[in-house]
Structures are given as structure tokens and as C-alpha cells.
Image (cartoon, rainbow, N blue to C red):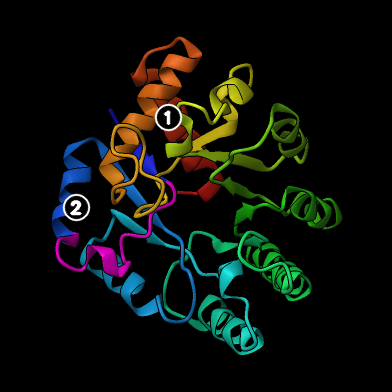
Amino acid sequence: MNLIDTHTHLFAEQFDEDRNEIVQKAQEAGISKLLLPNIDTATIDAMHQMVKDHPGVCYPMMGLHPSSVTENWEKDLAVVKKHLFEGDQNYIAVGEMGIDLYWDKSTLEVQQKAFRQQAEWAKELGLPIVIHVRDAFDEVFELVDELNDDKLTGVFHCFTGTKEQAEHIISYGGFKMGLGGVLTFKNAGLDQSIKDIDLKHFVLETDSPYLAPHPNRGKRNESSYITYVASKLAEVKGISIEEVAEITTQNAVEVFGL
């Protein structure tokens, strides 16, 4: 079985004590590739180091997380741009970017500016975008409605929306939805939202160290736990976990150009 964790922050400090062991554990569980979305300027070096330490396993993205769009956002975006256009890394996506209104609604305007800018760079470079959406589906849809064309592709990371929101995403034509630990949460209702939606629209992810799936909910998440998500998705769809692995892995290869 070959799985891809399309969204994992294994470069985060939560893994400083056992990072290599966590990567090895993931590989032993059948996860062949780990896709690393950047967070902000402080995480770039650690992410690059992981790619260097685990070639052919870890793949970097470059972007500015919406929660990091603060008073220095323009300087931070300039760093992101320099890496994307002048760096020596082979980035597979622009991300993690998006809109987050859970923590701070006052920065919406600058988050929108940062979103537009990163999406334009992605189009210029022919890269997908990885969108973080928290308490902000309407705001993100407004932006993607405006920016969408045949050059805009990517993933709505950590999809937790309704069936109608999933259908809106599918209508764009170039986007997949990332399913993670929330799918396994008993009262989340995500299983019902996605039950009738074709598997070709989904990729798997963990968002480690966050959102660990049941039965590890509340603990540090890690990439090997993606097997719990795949197992739950197989149950929801009434198919084998092997089929889930085959289709979602192909979807990840397709959207990220792996």
C-alpha cells in the first residue's frame, strides 16, 4: 500500500526529539512521500533541512500561512517570493496560504492581499496552491471565484465543509480537497458531507502535529496516523483501504506534479 501525506509539518519543534524516527515510522506504514507546507519565515530553514535529510521522501512548499500575515506581512512575503523565484529548492506548491478568521478577523484585508499575491505567483510558476480555510469559506470562495482560471489549481487543505461547499470547490475544475483527522471525529459530520462525492476529488493529509485522528485525538499527530484516515474513508465509501490508497495517491501525484 502506497500513501502520500499531502500536508505535514514534521519540521515543527514538536518533532525536534524524534523527527527521523517519525519519518521512518511513516515509511514503514506505507507512506512513501511527505509533503511539507511552509508556515512563515521562521520555519523555512527547518523545512529545507528535512528535505535535505530525506531526499525523495520530503517535498517542500513555499508560502505564508494566513495566521502569520501580521504587521510585517509585506516583508515576509518578499522572503517567500525570493525563495520561490530565486531559491535553489524545487518547490511543489505555493503554501500554506489562505484565510483564517478564527484567531483574528481584523487582518482580513491584508490576508486577502497576501492570498491574491501568492495565487498570482503560483500561476506564474505553474504551481498549485494549498489553501488553509478556517471560519472563512465565504471569503475564500470570493477570492477563488475572482482568481480562478485554467492556471489555478491546488488543494483545499483540511476540508471540513458541507456537501454544497465541496461541490463549489469541485466546480472550479482544478482543485482537490484534503481529508485528515477530522473525518474520524465522531460528531464532526464530515463523513456524511463527503459520502456521495467521488473519491477522485480527495487527497489524504495529517496536518501533523495537529488534528490527530481517533483513537489518538488530542495527542501529537504524525504522518503514520494517515492510515486511520484512509481506513475511515474506506469505511465511508464501502471500499477497501487499498483502493482508497491507490486513488488518493494518484490524485496527489496529479495535483502536485510528483
Image check: 4 left or right of 238? left
Q: Quarter of the image for the N terminus: give it.
A: top left
Which kind of residue does numbered mark 1 sit on?
Thr
The crowding category of the residue bearing disc 2, from other C-alpha atoms within 10 Å (few below 14, some 14 to 19, many at least 20), is some
The residues bearing labels 1 and 2 have C-alpha atoms spaced at a distance of 21 Å
Who is closer to the viewer here, 74 or 211?
211
Q: Which residue is mark 1?
A: 184
Which kind of residue does numbered mark 2 sit on?
Ile
Residue 135 point in image, percent of width and height: 67, 52
Image check: 207 left or right of 118? left
Magenta part, dominant SS: loop
Who is closer to the viewer here, 107 or 124?
107
Residue 141 point in image, percent of width and height: 78, 49
Residue 85 point in image, percent of width and height: 57, 79
Q: Residue at the location (35% across, 70% down)?
A: 47
Image check: 253 left or right of 30? right
Q: Residue furthest right?
A: 146
Residue 212 point in image, percent of width and height: 35, 43
Q: Could you tell which of marks 1 and 2 lies nearer the N-terminus? A: 2
Confirm whether the magenta stretch covers residue 115. Answer: no
Q: Give the quarter of the image for residue 244.
A: top left
Q: Which span is picked out in magenta?
A: 6-19
